[in-house]
Amino acid sequence: MPITILQPALVPVHSTRDESYGSESDSDGGVDLEGDISMRPAKRARRTGDDSIVTPGEQRQEPATAHTQRRTPPAIISSVAGTLSKTNKLLSVRPLRARYTPEIGDLVVGRIVEVQAKRWRVDVGASLLAQLPLSAINLPGGIQRRRTETDELQIRTFFSEGDLLVAEVQQLYSDGGAVLHTRSLRFGKLRNGVFMAVSGTGGGGGVVRAKRQTFVLDVGRAAGGGGAAADDAEKIDVVLGVNGYIWVSKHVEGEGAAAEGTGPGITRIEESVGLNVYSSQNDAIPPGTMREIARVRGVINALVEHGLRVDEEMVITGYHEAVEMARADGDGEETLYLGGERGKRLADTLVGR
Amino acid sequence: MASATTQQHLLLSPAELAYLHSSLSLTPPVRPDGRTATQFRPLTAETGVLPAANGSARVCFADGTEAVVGVKAEVEKRKVLPLSKGHEQIRESDGDDAVAGENDWVEITVEIPGYRDDDSSTVFLATMLSEALLADGEFTKKLWINRRFHWKLYIDQIILISPPLSYPLPLLSLTTHLALLSTRLPRLKSEADEDPMFDDDWDASRFIYPRQSSDTTSATVGSRPPVTLLVMAVGDNIIFDPSKEELAVADSALAVSVGERNAPVDEASETMDVDGEPQAGRQLRLLSVRTIDPPSRLTAPGVPNAVNAAAWGQGGPVAKDPGARAAEIDDVEGVWKAPRGGTKVAILGAMVQKVLEKGGIAEEVLDGLDAVDLG
Amino acid sequence: MPLDTSTYNLALLRIDGRRWNELRQLRGQIRTQAAADGSSYLEMGNTKIMCVVTGPSEEGKRRNQGASSASAAGSGSSTSASATNAADILVSVVVGGFSTVDRKKRARSDKRIQELQATLAKSLAAVLHTHLFPRSTISLSLHILSQDGSLLACMINAATLALVDAGVPMTDYLVACSAGSTSSHSAADERADPLIDLNNQEEQELPFLTVGTLGASDKVVVLVCESRVQVSRLEGMMVAAADGCVNIRAYLDSVVREKGHRMVAEGAVEKGASMAMDIDV
């Protein structure tokens, strides 16, 4: 069946006649302009019962400095809907969903949207575009020198509009704008794979900050059937940008973001920046690897669609589960599709439902 | 014909484009979301969402693209016919063929937030949809009331996300299809050429496309509104319902409109003979085919390693290599190059064939749409 | 369409059977669209609106592209010199041709729509913490699928829901409700009662206004009155509308909470700190 058409989930009906919203005014329908209608005092909606969710306008009485909370002495009032977190005296609300807010040290995947004279402007899914100064990249060939006018002139040979890169947030402006850098072998231009965008940190069910944002997934078992040649052809790099942008690509030994630790020693890093760092030429990728890349992408999609977090553990378990599922279904490992019903099954298995 | 909607700002890096293109050229193609070549994205559909419209439908793709279509009918007085023609009409009025519609009885508008009403892309979409609807001239006949009056049907379509996440034509077409299926017109009470009077009872209204089950002997049974499917080709692979990324590497793309009309007489006799098999097969008709200019043609090409090296003066001997120069013009494995030139006729033929053949895509899509509850 | 509202005095019931202070049925949903930053769907009786929020985001170069009609709308906070220090709010309203009983196509440049857009943008700018997002834009598009009175109120409520979903910080919910008076302006009826949440029929005949308040407080953010009404009735109408706002806020809040609870239950969001004992003492 090439087309699946689902019934929509029904919108829950709420009647205003529910007791909770019932008007407190007199029921005989009369009105008195002298003001016996409850002209209520400006009282904030209080939390009712044990709610783990706070909503905008909700009052927190404890006087303390608050993050993402507005302070109107003496009350602290939430400004977003989300869950409450407390660090000592600091109250903050983690929003149910919001755009990515950059923090220093975050590993992000971004897309160049604008090239300026000495810098690039990068879409990282935040409320502002991030900047990548020309001085914050490694020059090809690993030369350490001042950036010259020649470099400025050929700025587009490093990155041009549309190019994807993985970088680290180096600095934040007061307005929340991020400055990126790619001065490490782990960072740089992305190739040999596919991109996908899910909601980032701060949004429900997206990429979460973890110990490692990048990892290598061994897919040899599934992809190797056809005798796919070299070792690195059976591995897939997954870069989970903290901002929710994800890159899934073929693993190239000693290259790419997941190569941390396996690369050359610190002293040689600069020297070994190859010419291929700014390449947009893909290597030859065996069909088996492409299939597995699509499968990983499907797994991540299924995770997001069903509101699960996306991190190394979930992706790896999810991937193996998906391979098993394809096998068990009897329609061969070729079945990659993980949308609709299959995605639901996968998600259910993962959370043990 | 170019459509501006396909040229939206979808930035993809040359490396991504090259990867997508090569994975879609495999046999079988590997689509980024793991679908098979003929598989559609799952969608959620409901009809009758708008109480104030004669018919309506809402369709959402899993990725969040969503469209709402409302159909509204108004009674309109027919434009005065030229005298000579008028005579003819009167003479013909004894026969059935007096029932004839005109194309301007249907008006289709497409709204995409952030686009102007007269934006070329929205106009193009509306034209393509109405072209399919009006192609066989059967549809407007349904709007005939009598010789002086007719229904005027307004089909308003709204896309809820801007910019749309994929080329919206198939989405709009499916939504329109469902909206038309759920469209009801009040029952006519007056007779002949009187000023029309309608039954107030909405339960007595008739569907513009009568349902199969309700009355099998009705003259228009089996007729269904057209669907327009988007088909694209990469290499020799034919891929259905492309997502935006996939369309961005298409060698060519076609919008194929298919209608269905079972000849009423045959259907009646067939059901007599073969009992219990009313849907022995759909009689599909190709209504229109349009090529769509895929955005792939406007993408910037990738730069091969050799050329890059030359630019930085790092390549040493490589820079002098004549191969580097050639690489700028020729195809290099793994480097994106926008497709050039036209599509082979054979491929175009195969694309249309795949839609129309028995048990082909159009049939399955129509089967799928049949299953939608028209409540 | 002449309408006989005089029967109100007999049974104190309105045409649709409500009492003066009763809202119509509310139905709301947030996160109706996976792909948008924030989205909502709100029904107040037969007025049905969908709202999609994009942003806050920096448009970059793409600004020129989409500059067509949407940006011509009302940009709320760009009036002052400090425009660059706060986010712009762009509102674009799409009125479905099928939304009214008689089909009427409204062009995007329609004055009425432009006014609605400007009202909405201005009032949201007052409530949202736009200063947190300098140089960026929050754009809302509202799709009116069906209209049956209280259009502005419903638009404001739908926009608020979508913005909460998008996680844009705000002082409090911005909620709005319309209120009318039982007899027309010309009938110098001293005993006119206020009515809340008017439907289309009532709006045709009766003087009415729309009040938007900051959450459940009496702080009025929006007040739109386009009909002639005796000043003596104004207070009663506003009070009644503010009372309606309190109830609407409670409903919107329940929609948001329900969604939040479901997300916590699904494990999409970490549970909040168990603070029940520390706070609200």
Image: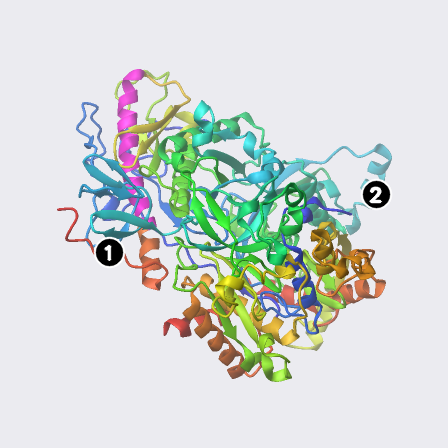
Judge from the rendering whether residue C197 lies leftward or rightward of residue B134; answer left or right: left
- Which residues are the magenta region? C231-256
Q: Label 2, secondary structure: give it.
A: helix
- Residue B91: assigned label: 2
Above or below for C125 versus C163: above
Judge if badges 2 and 1 mark residues of a common chain.
Answer: no
Q: Nearer the viewer, mark 2 or mark 1?
A: 1
How far separated are the C-alphas under marks 2 and 1? 84 Å
Judge from the rendering whether residue C114 lies leftward or rightward of residue B306; answer left or right: left
The chain holding disc 2 is B
Above or below for A90 versus C69: below
- Residue C273: assigned label: 1
The amino acid type, in three-letter code, at marker 2 is Arg
B89 magenta-colored: no
Farthest residue toward the right? B84
The residue drawn where x is 31% and y is 41% is A79
* Residue A225 spot, x, y in % from top left: 60, 84
* Residue C46 spot, x, y in % from top left: 43, 42
B99 and A332: which one is in front? Answer: A332
Judge from the rendering whether residue B161 lies leftward or rightward of residue B300; answer left or right: left
Asked if one can make out residue B175 in the rendered structure from this viewpoint, the answer is yes
The chain holding disc 1 is C
Above or below for B113 versus B259: above
The amino acid type, in three-letter code, at marker 1 is Ala
